[in-house]
């Protein structure tokens, strides 16, 4: 598949701190790509370098086959992690301003802005000032600013943080819709469940370095069906002490049990059924959450 | 280019659409005018009420004189001073004083005056009223009583007061300002006031728009809007858009003020009795005023842009504004000296220092227009400085708007400027 965004071993240091360390990744055109990583892994720095807000110390970045240039800005929509809109500006004026900066005519920007506010349930707020809106509403307004010019490349830094589940779903629908229209979407997050539901491709970074990347399906296949969903009657704390168990995650109704290399699930099943009644015992793909934790631990042990 | 225009438009409309803009057009000159003209205006308005004055004339001859010399009338034709004579009796005098005081408290009387024995030899008259210090009334009474006492002393020596006044009449110098356009009668005081008025407007324009610029940069930094903006336009476009947009807004404001002044200035000045000020606002003054508003605006806003880019809060901007205010206020502090020696070498030199130029040159132009060669030199120096400051501001702005947290040290700033 065509690669829309190509990052070739970029590095960036702030003083003696290496924020990003020879990172390479390729984002296929028309895909949803997640940059995952713990806090301080270098996600935002990477995004800022893609946007040419900060310049890499070394390495190069190509968007649509060309190095960054001013014309590209019209094709990109960017939602920064920390949110804010002009306090004293009316919402319609604000949408018009950002739309115009992205190359729309004033009239067109206002028309589209009005449409979007209808869709996101903000229509009554068009004539209100930024400071009169709640935080969630401001976030939605900012999201409209990001997509108003139907960008080819959408870069979202932690787009879901601080939103309620209804609005998270609303945003997800819009993101999927933009993908269907041909946009390439790159977003960063440390919320694994939203990444798991949306991303076709992921790149996991920690301490500025790439740990793993590729299609989500591939990544999961690599990690194999080495996880079990287990639910038992009564106390289940003993699970972690059983032989062949590497790690247990408690999801409430069930536990995700990671097997150590070469352990036999059938042996484990017998062991468990000896101790308590088994409600659920199911082979499953590891969750992204577990892949994340394991990969981060491995990379730090190295 | 289009982005630059979009930013200019937004910044301009944002200011011009506010109520504050129009209030500023009317209010700023009004307040400044008020500061200068109201004291004299008030002084004239205050005495326009009738004063009910009782006089206890111990000397015996004063009341008759007072009645004839205090014959001023109010605009409505009533007498300004309504005098009544109280007979003096040494036995009942203290009680009489209490009675008069009570009348004042009851509002039946405004004041009473006791003319003492021996007023001819220097005994002071006593004035009793609720407000101890009505300057105008006191001055009036003092003058009239003095005149009466002097006239009496002179009469004892066989001299008529009116004759003596003719003999002693002083000489007053009338000032005439010489310029290419001929000569015009001026008064030092009105020239000083009007130049001060222009300088104050210039000063408040530059300061308020400069601070607005710095604050709006800080807001965009704090809300991270600047990241979205730089992903749409270049930092240079953003900075220039802001400076030009706000500059256009400030010029509109000054322009509207000038229009207002042109339409209403003459009647307003006549109303406060300062028609002679009008001639001071000649074309040289007006043209240079606009030139220096523009140049001063760009010089100082490039500094405010740097302030905004390196600050994280309005508070920080506020703290660093002080030195800028000093640079602009200094010429006003030395204003009187400049007024007297507006062509001294050191004044010329100081007025060519770009940071002092707008205010100092405006004062010089009002008092005695400097040669055009000096004016053009000042334009050139300011434009060069503006270009240098603008370059510096653009460099620092580009880096500063994306830096949060600690304010940069000087070595860090130097490094920012050097970034490619």
Image: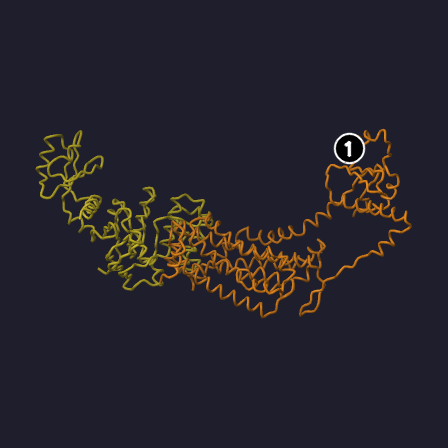
Chain colours: A yellow, B orange
Relative to B407, is A198 on the left or the right?
A: left
- Give residue B324's position: percent from left, percent from top: 51, 55
Q: Quadrant of residue A2?
A: bottom left
- Give residue B205's position: percent from left, percent from top: 55, 56
User: A28 and B191: which one is in front?
Assistant: B191
Question: Looking at the figure, which quarter contains the C terminus of chain B?
Answer: bottom left
User: B125 and A65: which one is in front?
Assistant: B125
User: A132 and B54: which one is in front?
Assistant: B54
Q: How many marks?
A: 1
Question: Looking at the figure, which quarter contains the N terminus of chain B?
Answer: bottom left
Tell which subunit mark 1 falls on.
Answer: B
Residue at x 51% of width, y 51% of height = B322
For disc 1, the marked residue is: B101
Work out whether A7 lies above or below A292.
below
- Give residue A248's position: percent from left, percent from top: 18, 38
CA neighbours of label 1 inside 10 A, class few (<14), some (14 to 19), many (20+)? some
- Give residue B295's position: percent from left, percent from top: 53, 62
Relative to B122, is A12 on the left or the right?
A: left
Circle 1 sits in a helix, a strand or a loop, which is it? helix
């Amino acid at each position: 598949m065509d690669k829309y965004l190509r990052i070739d071993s970029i590095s960036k240091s702030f003083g003696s701190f290496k924020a990003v360390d020879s990172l390479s990744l390729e984002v296929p055109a028309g895909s949803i790509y997640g940059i995952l990583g713990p806090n301080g892994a270098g996600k935002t720095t990477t995004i800022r370098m893609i946007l040419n807000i900060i310049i890499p110390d070394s390495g190069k970045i190509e968007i649509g086959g060309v190095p960054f240039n001013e014309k590209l800005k019209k094709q990109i929509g960017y939602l920064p992690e920390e949110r804010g809109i002009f306090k004293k500006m009316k919402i319609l004026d604000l949408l018009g301003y950002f739309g115009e900066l992205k190359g729309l005519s004033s009239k067109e920007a206002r028309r589209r802005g009005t449409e979007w506010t209808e869709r996101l349930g903000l229509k009554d707020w068009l004539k209100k000032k930024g400071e009169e809106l709640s935080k969630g509403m401001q976030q939605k307004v900012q999201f409209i600013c990001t997509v108003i010019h139907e960008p080819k490349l959408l870069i979202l830094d932690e787009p879901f943080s601080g939103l309620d589940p209804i609005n998270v779903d609303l945003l997800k629908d819009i993101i999927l819709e933009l993908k269907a229209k041909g946009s390439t979407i790159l977003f960063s997050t440390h919320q694994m469940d939203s990444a798991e539901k949306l991303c076709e491709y992921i790149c996991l970074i920690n301490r500025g370095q790439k740990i793993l990347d590729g299609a989500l399906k591939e990544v999961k296949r690599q990690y194999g069906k080495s996880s079990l969903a287990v639910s038992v009657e009564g106390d289940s704390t003993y699970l972690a002490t059983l032989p062949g168990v590497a790690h247990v995650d408690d999801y409430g109704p069930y536990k995700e049990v990671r097997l150590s290399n070469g352990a036999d699930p059938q042996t484990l099943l017998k062991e468990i059924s000896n101790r308590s009644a088994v409600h659920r015992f199911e082979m499953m793909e590891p969750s992204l959450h577990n892949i994340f934790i394991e990969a981060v631990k491995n990379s730090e042990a190295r | 280019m289009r982005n630059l225009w979009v930013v200019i438009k937004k910044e301009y409309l944002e200011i011009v659409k506010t109520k504050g803009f129009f209030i500023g057009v009317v209010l700023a000159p009004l307040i400044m005018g008020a500061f200068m003209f109201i004291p004299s205006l008030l002084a004239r308005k205050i005495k326009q009420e009738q004063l009910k004055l009782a006089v206890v004339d111990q000397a015996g001859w004063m009341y008759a004189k007072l009645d004839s010399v205090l014959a001023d009338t109010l605009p409505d034709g009533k007498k300004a001073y309504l005098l009544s004579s109280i007979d003096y009796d040494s036995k009942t005098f203290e009680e009489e004083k209490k009675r008069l005081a009570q009348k004042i408290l009851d509002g039946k009387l405004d004041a009473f005056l006791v003319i003492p024995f021996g007023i001819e030899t220097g005994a002071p008259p006593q004035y009793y009223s609720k407000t101890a210090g009505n300057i105008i009334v006191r001055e009036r009474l003092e003058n009239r009583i003095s005149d009466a006492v002097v006239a009496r002393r002179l009469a004892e020596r066989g001299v008529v007061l009116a004759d003596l006044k003719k003999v002693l009449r002083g000489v007053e110098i009338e000032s005439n300002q010489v310029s290419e356009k001929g000569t015009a009668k001026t008064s030092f005081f009105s020239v000083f006031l009007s130049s001060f008025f222009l300088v104050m407007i210039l000063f408040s324009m530059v300061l308020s728009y400069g601070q607005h610029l710095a604050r709006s940069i800080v807001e965009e930094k704090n809300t991270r809007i600047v990241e979205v903006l730089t992903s749409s336009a270049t930092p240079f476009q953003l900075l220039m858009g802001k400076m030009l947009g706000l500059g256009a807004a400030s010029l509109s404001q000054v322009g509207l003020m000038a229009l207002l002044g042109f339409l209403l200035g003459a009647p307003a000045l006549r109303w406060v009795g300062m028609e002679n000020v009008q001639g001071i606002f000649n074309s040289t003054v007006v043209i240079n005023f606009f030139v220096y508003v523009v140049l001063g605006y760009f010089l100082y806003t490039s500094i405010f842009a740097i302030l905004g880019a390196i600050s994280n809060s309005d508070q920080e901007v506020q703290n660093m504004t002080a030195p800028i205010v000093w640079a602009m206020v200094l010429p006003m502090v030395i204003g009187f000296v400049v007024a007297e020696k507006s062509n001294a070498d050191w004044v010329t030199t100081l007025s060519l220092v770009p940071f002092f130029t707008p205010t100092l040159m405006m004062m010089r132009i009002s008092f005695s227009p400097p040669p055009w060669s000096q004016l053009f030199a000042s334009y050139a120096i300011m434009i060069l400085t503006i270009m240098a400051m603008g370059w510096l501001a653009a460099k620092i702005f580009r880096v500063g708007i994306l830096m949060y947290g600690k304010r940069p040290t000087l070595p860090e700033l130097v490094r920012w400027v050097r970034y490619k």
